[in-house]
């Protein structure tokens, strides 16, 4: 089976560009609910029109409903969900497991794909979600070719891989940076693109000079074109292009290039159009690389010198004078093309249109720019980028606007008849649909102009205003018969209309009535009128440094979680905690990839009382190995509604931590709807923001690609990223060399404790970061005093302020404005 090429659609014109350049499928945002908060969404009527266009050309249509849903949204969204399912999209792409469960209940036959926002990085995670009947998993972009190959061998599920477009530095679905810094949730489509900000590198509390490298976590764009043969060979079902915010010309160039590469890989030929591949970058590029497909390369993933579109790197400036400049360039550029000159060492960047271009020899050109261009600002050695090509972009537009270049559906015509009977026309498409029409008049003997194969074909063959072209044409009639060509043309028009109607008809699926959907949802919306007051809350604590153990001596606590850097010292720590009489649990990594299960196997052998699980793969692995202990689910499962909560409870999680995307009102609504869940609420922590398969330590403190060449520099220094607001956000490393950036200001939800108690919450968590044992003990004692009524919230904040990096606030919990629509 040939793999599918999947293209993004943000406008109708983008759909045409994708279809007519060879896309097999399109994906589009769900109206009002999708991960591109800055797009102008299609209406349902426009979505229906898009569905007709896709079906006509035999192209599949997927609708991305790839955000988390809050509890109070579930009932109001039911009419939209039923309306969407009535349109029969080929699949709905989801992040929220609660939405997946809801779709399966209201439309049992509806296809569901798991979004990359679900952070699926292993076959074990796919197995965990088996009960949701998800047809396809869109894998995390951080997987290498080797990891993809292993997953392909270990699961029968359909797999989709991103091959081109923008890369997030953090795992999709695991990035809380926009949330924690700007109050805009990436899990709600409101990403503020915090990875594109300029940051200062702080090393051991002091700024480290990096010259012009300021965009420390802004990756180059992904271009997996040269890896298509390997991906095809391993059996990946779908190749995905990112770009719902890009131009139609960009989509045309990218789709055409990947169409050619896939077809060449399938047929084992070599077919390229170098200029069209360059146009992929001219129309949009932050610089390109293979992302993580060849593994993590901390030196090439991020250049850190720029974060916005520059275009194709054409060459360098050789010399310049007052009127013109000479460039060394890999390709000829013409008058009217746009160039950008970047002197990165001087933080200089200037762009404009070419007034004249003269070839001086092999790959050397004299360039005169438009009169207002500041030539004095350009220096020899500056980089030259090609970011506009009007003529080439016009050709790209013609690829989906010129009727002579549009995609056509090959059809087979068969014409037959005998004297005294109507002429019969049979038309078939590649999928086997067939229509038959007959003439209103009967065939008769010709007096002057008998029918021939040529004139019958001429009468049938005028298809330029349709989506069809004749592939095969067969005529079975005697040589001396006659029928007026007007009737034959009418038969052709009628036959194609009938065939078109069959092609564009949506496949009906069973969708329940609104009343049935509401009835199904009712148990997940029960608002508890009275909940038992919690008089003896359990205070749990998460430790990140072995020396923090000293703080716990003689304290009465619930569960003590261990989340040490590099996965070290757990054995000794567990023994010490058992001697203190504490219940223990170990936090798993946020991400586990193929070949990394030895981490979990080693931890399980230490026999903690439980695990604080952070991904579905870890949950499934422990269940498969019948590990006997408590399974506690962390915030990273992104639970924001009762359907998702009960789904994960059914998967085996005994205690759940609500998503950090919730503000206080949304959190309380969730607790009211699921009082039977054992909830654990994080009271005090530094919100984990970026979680990255990119090592800041290796990238900027060494010249190493990664471990072990880096010399474990992370063990000798503390690093933070200081944002434009001058807040320093500390970065920590796990044993797989993945970095987590924590928000520099701690968040406390102590003000919510009375409400949380009333809502039946018994377990509360305090998370340490770099606290000394003394600071942590002070923090724990303050919260215990708060529970006991010996101090109030104001006293607690005043007492703890000095022990935090940059103070304490209430963070996202108080931000209601974060969830307003940002649609254009």
Image (tube, rainbow, N blue to C red):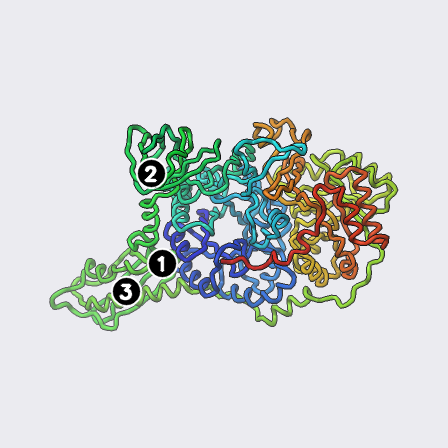
Label 3 sits on a secondary structure element that is helix
Question: Which circle, 3 or 2, is nearer the viewer?
Answer: 2
The residue beneath circle 2 is: 369
Q: Is residue 5 left or right of residue 397?
A: right
Of the numbered discs 3 and 2, the one sitting upstream in the chain is 2
Label 1 sits on a secondary structure element that is loop
Q: Position of residue 475 (x, y in %)?
A: 24, 60
Q: Which class describes the residues within 10 Å of circle 1: few (<14), some (14-19), or many (20+)?
A: some
Residue 269 appears in the rendering: no
In the displayed structure, 320 sits above or below 178; it is above
User: Which is more toward the observer, 729 or 703?
Assistant: 729
Question: Which circle, 1 or 2, is nearer the viewer?
Answer: 2
Q: What separation in Å lies between label 1 and label 2 (alpha carbons)?
A: 53 Å
Of the numbered discs 3 and 1, the one sitting upstream in the chain is 1
Q: Which class describes the residues within 10 Å of circle 3: few (<14), some (14-19), or many (20+)?
A: many
Q: Which class describes the residues within 10 Å of circle 2: few (<14), some (14-19), or many (20+)?
A: many
Q: Position of residue 67 (x, y in %)?
A: 58, 55
- Corner quadrant of residue 563: top right
The residue beneath circle 3 is: 492
The residue beneath circle 1 is: 429
Q: Are marks 3 and 1 in contact (CB under 8 Å)?
A: no
Q: Residue at x 26, y 62 (%)?
A: 415
Of the numbered discs 1 and 2, the one sitting upstream in the chain is 2
Q: Position of residue 543 (x, y in %)?
A: 76, 41
Q: What separation in Å lies between label 3 and label 2 (alpha carbons)?
A: 55 Å
User: Which is more toward the observer, 787 or 524?
Assistant: 787
In the picture, the disc for residue 567 is none
- Corner quadrant of residue 708: top right
Q: Position of residue 333 (x, y in %)?
A: 32, 38
């Amino acid at each position: 089976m040939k793999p599918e090429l999947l293209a993004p659609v943000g406008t109708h014109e983008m759909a045409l560009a994708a279809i007519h350049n060879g896309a097999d499928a399109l994906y589009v945002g769900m109206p009002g609910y999708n991960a591109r908060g800055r797009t102008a969404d299609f209406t349902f009527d426009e979505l229906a029109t898009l569905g007709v266009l896709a079906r006509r050309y035999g192209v599949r249509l997927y609708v991305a409903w790839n955000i988390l849903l809050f509890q109070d949204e579930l009932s109001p969204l039911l009419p939209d969900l039923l309306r969407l399912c009535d349109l029969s999209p080929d699949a709905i792409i989801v992040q929220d497991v609660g939405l997946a469960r809801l779709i399966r209940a209201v439309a049992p036959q509806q296809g569901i794909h798991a979004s990359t926002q679900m952070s699926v990085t292993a076959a074990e995670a796919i197995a965990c979600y088996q009960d949701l009947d998800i047809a396809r998993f869109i894998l995390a972009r951080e997987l290498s070719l080797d990891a993809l190959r292993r997953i392909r061998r270990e699961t029968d599920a359909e797999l989709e891989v991103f091959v081109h477009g923008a890369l997030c530095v953090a795992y999709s679905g695991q990035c809380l940076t926009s949330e924690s810094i700007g109050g805009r949730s990436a899990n709600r489509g409101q990403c503020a693109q915090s990875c594109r900000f300029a940051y200062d590198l702080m090393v051991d509390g002091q700024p480290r000079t990096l010259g012009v490298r300021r965009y420390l976590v802004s990756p180059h764009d992904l271009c997996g074109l040269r890896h298509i043969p390997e991906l095809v060979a391993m059996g990946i079902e779908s190749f995905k292009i990112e770009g719902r915010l890009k131009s139609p010309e960009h989509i045309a160039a990218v789709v055409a290039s990947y169409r050619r590469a896939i077809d060449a890989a399938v047929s084992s030929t070599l077919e390229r159009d170098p200029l069209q591949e360059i146009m992929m970058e001219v129309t949009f590029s932050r610089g390109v690389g293979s992302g993580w497909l060849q593994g993590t390369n901390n030196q090439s993933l991020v250049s850190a010198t720029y974060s916005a579109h520059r275009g194709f790197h054409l060459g360098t400036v050789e010399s310049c004078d007052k009127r013109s400049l000479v460039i060394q360039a890999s390709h000829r550029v013409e008058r009217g093309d746009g160039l950008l000159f970047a002197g990165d060492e001087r933080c200089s960047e200037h762009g404009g249109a070419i007034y004249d271009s003269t070839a001086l020899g092999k790959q050397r050109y004299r360039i005169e720019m438009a009169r207002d261009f500041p030539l004095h600002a350009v220096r020899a050695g500056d980089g030259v980028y090609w970011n506009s090509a009007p003529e080439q972009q016009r050709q790209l537009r013609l690829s989906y606007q010129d009727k002579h270049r549009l995609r056509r559906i090959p059809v087979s015509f068969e014409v037959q008849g005998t004297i005294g009977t109507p002429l019969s026309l049979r038309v078939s498409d590649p999928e086997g649909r067939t229509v038959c029409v007959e003439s209103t008049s009967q065939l008769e003997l010709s007096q002057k102009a008998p029918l021939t194969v040529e004139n019958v074909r001429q009468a049938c063959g005028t298809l330029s205003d349709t989506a069809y072209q004749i592939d095969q044409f067969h005529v079975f009639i005697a040589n001396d018969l006659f029928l007026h060509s007007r009737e034959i043309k009418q038969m052709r028009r009628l036959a194609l209309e009938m065939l078109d109607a069959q092609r564009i008809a949506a496949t009906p699926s069973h969708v329940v009535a609104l009343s049935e959907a509401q009835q199904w949802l009712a148990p997940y919306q029960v608002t508890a009128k009275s909940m038992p007051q919690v008089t003896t809350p359990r205070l749990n604590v998460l430790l990140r440094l072995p020396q923090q153990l000293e703080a716990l001596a003689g304290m009465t606590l619930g569960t003590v979680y261990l989340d040490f850097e590099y996965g070290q010292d757990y054995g000794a720590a567990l023994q010490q905690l058992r001697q203190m009489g504490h219940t223990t649990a170990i936090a798993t990594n946020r991400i586990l990839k193929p070949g990394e299960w030895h981490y979990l196997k080693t931890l399980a052998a230490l026999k903690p009382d439980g695990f604080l699980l952070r991904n579905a793969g870890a949950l499934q692995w422990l269940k498969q190995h019948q590990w006997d202990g408590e399974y506690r689910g962390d915030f990273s499962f992104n639970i924001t509604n009762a359907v998702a909560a009960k789904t994960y409870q059914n998967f085996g999680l005994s205690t759940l931590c609500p998503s950090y995307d919730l503000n206080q009102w949304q959190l309380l609504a969730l607790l009211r709807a699921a009082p039977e869940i054992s909830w654990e609420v994080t009271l005090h922590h530094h919100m984990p923001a970026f979680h990255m398969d990119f090592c800041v330590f290796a990238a900027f403190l060494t010249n190493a690609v990664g471990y072990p060449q880096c010399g474990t520099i992370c063990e000798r220094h503390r690093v933070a990223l200081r944002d434009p607001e001058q807040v320093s956000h500390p970065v920590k490393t796990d044993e797989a060399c993945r970095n987590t950036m924590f928000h520099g200001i701690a968040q406390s939800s102590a003000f919510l404790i009375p409400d949380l108690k009333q809502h039946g919450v018994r377990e509360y968590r305090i998370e340490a970061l770099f606290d000394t044992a003394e600071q942590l003990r002070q923090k724990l004692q303050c919260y215990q005093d708060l529970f006991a009524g010996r101090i109030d919230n104001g006293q607690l904040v005043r007492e703890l302020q000095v022990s935090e990096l940059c103070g304490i606030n209430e963070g996202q919990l108080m931000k209601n404005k974060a969830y307003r629509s940002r649609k254009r």
